[in-house]
Image (tube, helix red, strand yellow):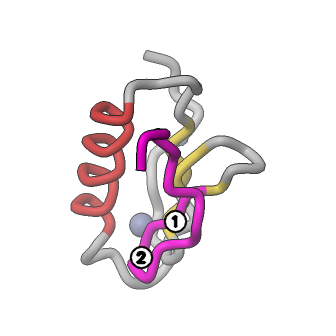
Amino acid sequence: MTTATYNTAPYDKDVYWDRGTGAFVCKHCKKTYPVTLPVPLTIFAVVKKNFERLHQRCKAPVRIPEPTETV
Ligand SMILES: [Zn+2]
């Protein structure tokens, strides 16, 4: 494997990558985390991991802050 490709397949986990919107999506609370591509795979992996950790325990739809908060 010489070409680096983003893992665009839906994860078995609670978080999946939506290539249509270019964002990670939590299956539980539907919260999204948009990522502007292209981004280094290392960053991509870190963001994915962090998002998974944040949402691995969230089960039901919960009240969350506005996801469109600008930084
Ligand atoms: Zn969640």
Q: Secondary structure at mark 2?
A: loop
Instruction: Specify the amino acid type for callout 2.
Output: Asp
Task: Using the image, tell me which numbered label, if any, was put on residue 16.
Answer: 1
| Magenta-colored stretch includes residue 16 | yes
Q: Which residue range is magenta in the image?
A: 1-17
Instruction: Specify the amino acid type for callout 1.
Output: Tyr
Q: Main secondary structure of the magenta part?
A: loop
Instruction: Name the one closer to the observer, 53 or 3.
Output: 3
Q: CA distance from mark 2 to mark 1?
A: 7 Å
Residue in the picture at 49% in, 77% down: 28
Res. 2 image quadrant: top left
Question: So how many labels did they put on this image?
Answer: 2
Task: Using the image, tell me which numbered label, if any, was put on residue 14.
Answer: 2
Instruction: Name the one closer to the observer, 23 or 61.
Output: 23
Is the CB atom of the residue marked by disc 1 within 8 angstroms of ligand 1's nearest atom?
no
Specify few, some or many for label 1: CA neighbours under 10 Å numbering under 14, 14-19, or 20 or more: many
Q: Position of residue 27 (x, y in %)?
A: 53, 74
Q: Secondary structure at mark 1?
A: strand
Res. 42 image quadrant: top left
